[in-house]
Image: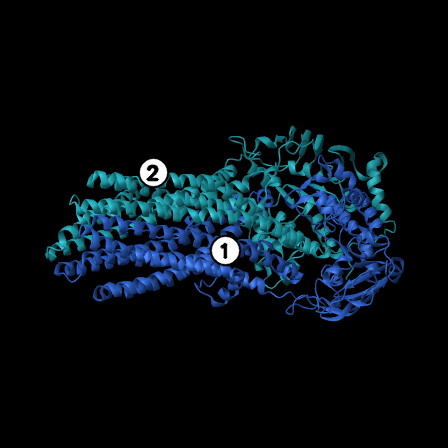
Amino acid sequence: MSFGIGVSGAGMGPRGAMESFAEGNGQRGQVYNPRVVRRMLVYLRPYTKMMALAFVAMLADSALTLLAPYLLKVTVDTYIAQGDQAGLVHISLWTAGTFSGIYLANRTQQYLLSLVGQRMLANIRRDLFYHLQELSLRYHDTHIVGVTVSRVMNDVATINDLLSQGIITLLGDVFVLAGIIVVMLTMNLQLALLTFTVLPLMLLVTLWFSRRARVAFRETRTSVAKVVGGLAEDIAGVRVIQAFGQEDTSQENFSAVNAVNRQANISAMSLSFIFLPAIEFLGILATAIVLWFGGRAVGTGTVTLGVLVAFLAYVTRFFNPVQELSRMFTTLQTAMAGGEQVVKLLDTVPDVLDQPEAIELTDVVGGVKFEHVSFRYRPELPEVLHDVCLEIQPGQTVALVGPTGAGKTSLGNLIARFYDVTAGAVLIDGIDVRTVKQRQLHRQIGLVPQDAFLFSGTIADNIRFGCPAATAEAVERAAKLANAHEFITAKPEGYETRIQEGASNLSVGQRQLVCIARAILTDPRILILDEATSNVDSLTESLIQDALRKLLQARTAVVIAHRLSTIRNADLICVVQDGQIVEQGKHQALLARAGVYAALYQRQFAE
Amino acid sequence: MGVYITLVLIDLITIINPQLIRWTIDQGIGTGDDSLLTLAVGGLLALILIKGVLTYYQGLWTEVASQSVAYDLRNALQRKITELSFSFHDQAEAGDLLSRAIQDVERVRFLTGRAIFRIIESVFLMIITAGVMIWMNPQLGLLAVLSMPLLIMRSIHFGRIFRPLSLQIQKQLAVLTTRVEQNLRGVRVVKTFAQEEAEIERFARENRKWYELSALSAKMQSNHMPLLNLIANLSSVVILLYGGTLVINQALTLGELVAFTTYVAQIVTPVRYLGMVLPAITIAGASAERVFEILDTAPLVTDEPDAPDLVVERGEVVFENVAFAYGRQAGVLKDISFVAKPRQVIALLGATGSGKTSVVNLIPRFYDPTAGRITIDGRDIHTVSLNSLRSQIGMVLQETTLFAASIRENLAFGRPQATQLEIETAAKDAQAHEFIMQLPDGYDTEVGERGRTLSGGQKQRLAIARALLTDPRILILDDATSSVDSETEHLIQVALERVMQGRTTFVIAHRLSTVHSADLILVLDKGRIAARGRHAELLQSSTLYAGIYHQQLKLGSARLETAKSGVTL
């Protein structure tokens, strides 16, 4: 129930009208985490002026909102009760003016707040994206893409509710509450104190609610995360599900997590359905106290009717912010959880960093040297490379062979400095890779990745990925060299063919050809080929082989391969086993040694 | 039904309350009669208590109803998604499907839940309040009601102009999401090509676009609510001015005036609510469309009514003049005919895009042929139930998909009731038992998201064991041993040979060893069978085959005869 004239705006747009939908992992469910708030406040700093203006507008809004019931009291007591028609018109104009003021203040406040909020979101996203580019592969190895995406998109969105809307609304509510208390105490001390007896009760109810809600709403977040996860897996594995005819089982599993989520939501919302009416009841209880004691006081003449009416209006206003605060409770909780994740991501220190005095690396000849290199991916994992020494002359093609997990890929990763060595050093043209600028180092290196990864966009976009400025002619030339031109032009849209999700409209071999074209276009001095020739039929393989031959010319190349046939022509073959180079030499020499390589080779070609 | 009753009761209580206060002011105060005052105050408290209880039940019931709607919709979507044929999944994006099942369903739920009741409640409350005010004092009542059409029109207008913008913002958010996702998936490529700055620039561009749209929306939204409040407040000033004059002229009691101002304030709440909820409804409507778009998609491959189960006894597979095309694209397969006799190994050979995968995808009916027919033991596979057909076919696909569950659960995926002994036997046959036992929890080891914790070769052997466990009569293999070392490759080879025994097997061949031992080799070229026969014959008769073969042979000129086992690394 609301009594009296004047409605103050609680800023809830259409988005606010949607019940907040939390997504993400289970958090501790704090409503206030000073560390998160401090970190996020940094993002408000550039907008101090706008926030100050919003604050002033909020103060004006609160003050005018407090004034309205007083004007009502004056209207009733002074003009209506005394029959002053002219005065009534006069005060009505004042009241209308007050309301117009409220409108302006409220509108300004909301506009500034949401503007700052959106700008802040854009800035946090920009910083997160920037930070993600800085983070080394060690981070990306250990984090699931979908989760990180949700940090940048969903968690950031929740912060807005906390910072721009949350802080000012909270401050505003506190001001209004304090103002009302002061005004009520001034108007009538006794009646005010009587009314405030409801406050301890309200505090108890709120504490009860917050304790329960923390757990309940956390439960909704974890359960919805499971729903998302379950469905994501069903989508990824849909072909297997169908091939094995397991549609029923997967449905059973899904509806189990789905049901848990439903129950969690119902339980959490039931708490609100108890809490909100309870607060409303306490509000009416306060109204009743005012009416009963105030009414009797009017009867005895100690209180005027106007004071009573104004009191009723103030009491309503008093409970509005409390209800508002409780509504914000879950929003704040979600925002804190989201903020925590964002701060955690922002605070992740990239473990491969440019040294402050990092030097420029230009005009690389292409000599690569491993000096007593040892390496482990993470401190808790076993060492993958032990004391590896290897020297590659400029222009040489070096093949790395050996069983899975022997450390071949790690060697390639260390040349590009995707990770830092644990001991020893990797040198390019005699310069330690840790002393040069990473991006310049990377510009000298080309990669044909194992998974033949392509981005969404057109084929042309993908080929020119490394040189966005490349002309259509240059792209075509690269594609021709990579033996990709033919299949590309056979497509109805040629180079403008869009890559579908998972590049499903290209075969694996075609994807590899595009990847080779992409590498050719950047003209790198050092090339890393990661098992680029598996998974294709012999025809495509010969196209790839041919393209690679052109690509390898006059470059230093490290080929990580399992097909021995592809690397027989290498200048140097290194057999990697258990993190060490156990044999090296040319194909014939190694065969003659009748060691590990010879055994590997024989096995492969016996089949 | 109970919900409607609570709805009416809650509205009635909301209407009665101001009357109680009016009555208190007019009758209870100033007369010195405390009993009337007590009665009024007691009544007020009692009513609000009842309202509280009603609100609780109404909330609970509607929440249960709306959560059940979301639950049902998500179940239906999940079912649909797992049922839709491969041609659907070739086109669909996982992120898009997920956002429909999560966010869009949530928006629809909002519409079907309390929102709908609160809308009815709000409209009901507005009408009754208007009626009561006109009944109390026609002139003043009409004056008060005047603001209502203004408020409603304003809200509707806002919804209309706001909706396209909010849809645009949603779209731009999706663009941003895709950018981040793509960047993360291709992180190695981004880094080696040193394209971080270009990526940041690209992201910043889309981010700025999003910000500009959001700023526009902020501007529109920040005016909306304050304006509605202003209209309502000014209308209450008019009431106070005119009503005050009536009181002065003793045409109205003070209590009535207070009740009037309360009613005017009360009208604003539902209007405000409608103002908020109407744009949300339009958004929910768009969401519902997106949800039903999926639910209404008919799977291209379906059971015929009353399709009988297929019982495979011999395992003879016959293609009769089969043609196939994906959607509107040019034909992928043309006039494919062959007979795979029981227990034969059929090797499919050909360039990328020649149609090998398409041939094997037709056997379990992942797609239906556009012409011709396929029979198993003489029965058209189109006429039998999908489930029985697929349960007879084992598949080891090129990209191994494992689920986030234990290894045991993954192996038993096709036959959840398999015993530990059966699982272990299958794992041993697939050369997987040994490495499984070396894992910390053996068969209970949890496989991370998409099997991240396992190597490619390990995943492939698990996939073989998984297929073995269903003991299929017909087996489809892609023998690409991607990204494994020769030791593992050897293990896989041994496993595959064991698996093929006693089954009709189709192999997409990548290796000559497979070709050598095949009973029938089909050489595909641009969707047609260009040559067929055994290795020795083909070598003589087909230049295409000889070409493919010699290419490999040239590379392996130093081919040595050795034992397949006994080499330790």
Q: Residues within 10 Å of mark 1 (few under 14, many from 20)?
A: many
Instruction: Determine the secondary structure under disc 2.
Output: helix
Residue A351 tag number: none
Q: What colour is chain B?
A: cyan
Q: Which chain is blue?
A: A
- Report the residue marked by disc 2: B149
User: Does residue B114 appear anywhere in the picture?
Assistant: no
Residue B266 at what x, y percent from top left? 29, 47
Closer to us: B137 or A167: B137
Circle 2 crowding by C-alpha within 10 Å: few under 14, some 14–19, many from 20 = few
Which amino acid type is shown beneath numbered disc 2?
Pro
Q: Residue furthest front?
A: A86
Q: Quadrant of residue B136?
A: top left
- Indicate the quadrant where residue B110 lies: top left
User: Which quadrant is the C terminus of chain B positioned in?
Assistant: bottom right
Cα distance in 3D space between marks 1 and 2: 33 Å
Q: Is residue B366 left or right of residue A106?
A: right
Left or right of residue B366: residue A566:
right
Camera-side residue of A436 and A507: A436
Residue B363 seen from this side? yes
Say which chain tag 1 marks: A
Mark 2 chain:
B
Residue A117's disc number: 1
* Front position among marks 1 and 2: 2
Would residue A262 appear left or right of B215 to someone viewing this image? left
Which amino acid type corresponds to the residue marked 1 in the rendered image? Gly
Query: Please, is residue B522 above or below residue A201 in the view?
Result: above
